[in-house]
Image: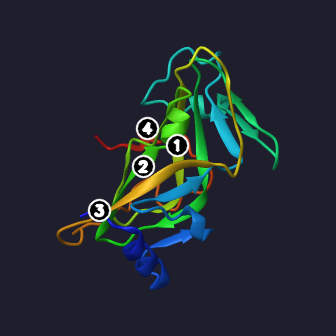
Amino acid sequence: MILNDKTIRKYLNEKILEISPLEDYQIQPSSVDLRLGYDFLIYPDEIEVLDVKDQSFLEKMQKIEVKKGEGFIVKPKQFILATTIEYVKLPDFLTAFVEGRSSLGRLGLFIENAGWVDAGFEGNITLEFYNANSRPIKIYPEMRICQLVFAKMVEPAEKPYKGKYQGQRGTTASKIFLDKR
């Protein structure tokens, strides 16, 4: 079952679902808009291979912080990581889908985060951007960048999320090298 605005507000008021900071205008009929944060991570061209078993690429990643009012340009065919301003905390019976905004998709900016937020997750949402356009796209911190669609699970998760990204703050690079299998 997808949550509507009334239920989202109820869960927020009762502190069952937490999103902070949050303004009322961000709550849509069946989702919550999240805003773009101030920091970005870029994989520089000098990295020849991203080896999933070797974390040394993290040292070479370029972190860019943008000030309020300044924009960030996503070059054509460029892949970057970004973050939301909002810190999200899901209970053990809610999951969320991350969806890009249609208005940005129509410019060629694909927004993803693997598309899914597990029940029990808490943290800023790290977003993956890809500019599929042949033109640069300029985006700005604090703009509405994506939306969370919440789904109520049939029963609470037996093992809510407690993985390697739990509690993440800001843009977080891949930690795939920590996978046990």
Q: Residue at x 59, y 14 (%)?
A: 134
Q: Mark 2 near mark 1, Cβ–Cβ under 8 Å?
A: yes
Upstream in sequence: badge 2 or badge 4? 2
How many numbered discs?
A: 4
Circle 2 Cα neighbour tier, 10 Å, few/some/many (<14 / 14–19 / ≥20): many
Please tell me whether mark 4 sits on a helix, a strand or a loop.
Answer: helix
Residue type, label 4: Phe
Upstream in sequence: badge 1 or badge 4? 1
Please tell me whether mark 1 sits on a helix, a strand or a loop.
Answer: strand
Circle 1 Cα neighbour tier, 10 Å, few/some/many (<14 / 14–19 / ≥20): many
Residue 169: percent from the left, percent from the top? 60, 57
Distance from disc 2 to disc 1, alpha carbons, whole Å, reads 9 Å
| Residue indicated by mark 4 | 177
Residue type, label 1: Leu
Q: Quadrant of the C terminus?
A: top left
Q: Is residue 122 visible?
A: yes
Distance from disc 1 to disc 4, alpha carbons, whole Å, reads 19 Å
| Residue indicated by mark 1 | 127
Q: Quadrant of the N terminus?
A: bottom left
| Residue indicated by mark 2 | 98
